[in-house]
Amino acid sequence: MNENSSGYVSIIGEALLDPIISLIEKAQEGRLAGANEVQTSVYENGYSCSIILLTVVLLESFITRTKYVMGVSNKDINALAFFKQTFEGNSLYDILYELFVIRDIIAHNHVWEGQVLWDEEGLKFNSTPIHHSEGYGDSKFRNSILIDKRVSKRLSLNLFPTRICWEDAKKVLKSAYKVLSFLEEENFQFCYVSNWTVYYKGDYRNFLDVVDNL
């Protein structure tokens, strides 16, 4: 073996930091007014969904790294099942569960259908919208949703796609950081999140500081 060679593992997680930060900065340049009963603005919805998708992909990447470092080779165990099995009883599993639910809702664009109307309070549903559960959603979705409010039970994340907004993006970022920090506490080879530095608003900052101050 060449004495200059070294090991290499193809984990993409940290490469997503700069794109996530860029999306956060771009989102903050516009008006982030939150959602009415039916939707938020296309601008806010688009950037919020993009931030959430990349954040959960980053998180899954480091859970995959954890599997690799621990020598878990079972290809049939997904990230959620691995976390639950490996860190049994850890309350972060319930948070991780809902992060994967909102990721799936965005990635698969769950379809709801309903009648809407405008009144003095803005856009509202004229009747309870119907989720096409036969075509969208799995047991994670059904276990997580408060169907009358269309939000998740623990984090109150919007699970109605067009209502996903900046507040949801912030919750996902802060929750993902908790999981990543836990992995680092277990073994810094799993994830070294406390050392992450990003270029944000013209200066280099610790990623945690950016997330904390959103």
Image (tube, rainbow, N blue to C red):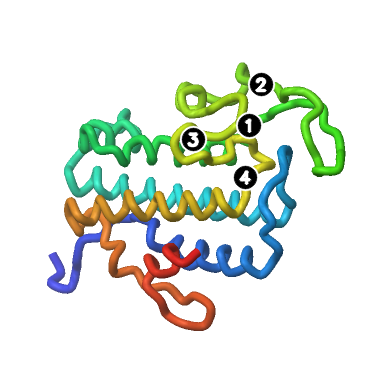
- In contact (CB < 8 Å): disc 1 and disc 3: no
- In contact (CB < 8 Å): disc 2 and disc 3: no
User: Where residue 110 is drawn, which disc sits there?
Assistant: 1
Real-space Cα distance between discs 4 and 3?
13 Å
User: Where residue 132 is drawn, which disc sits there?
Assistant: 2
Real-space Cα distance between discs 1 and 4?
12 Å
Real-space Cα distance between discs 2 and 4?
18 Å
x%, y% of residue 145?
52, 28
Graded by Cα atoms within 10 Å as few (under 14), some (14 to 19) or many (20 or more), the crowding at tag 2 reads few
Looking at marks 2 and 3 on the same chain, the residue that comes earlier in the sequence is marked by 3
- Report which residue position mark 3 lands on: 101
User: Where residue 204 is drawn, which disc sits there?
Assistant: none
- In contact (CB < 8 Å): disc 2 and disc 4: no
Q: Tell me the quarter of the image containing the N terminus.
A: bottom left
Q: Is 102 situated above or below 8? A: above
Residue type at mark 3? Val
Residue type at mark 4? Ile
Mark 1 lies on a secondary structure that is loop
- In contact (CB < 8 Å): disc 2 and disc 1: yes
Q: Which of 182 and 196 lies nearest the eye of the viewer?
A: 182
Looking at marks 2 and 1 on the same chain, the residue that comes earlier in the sequence is marked by 1
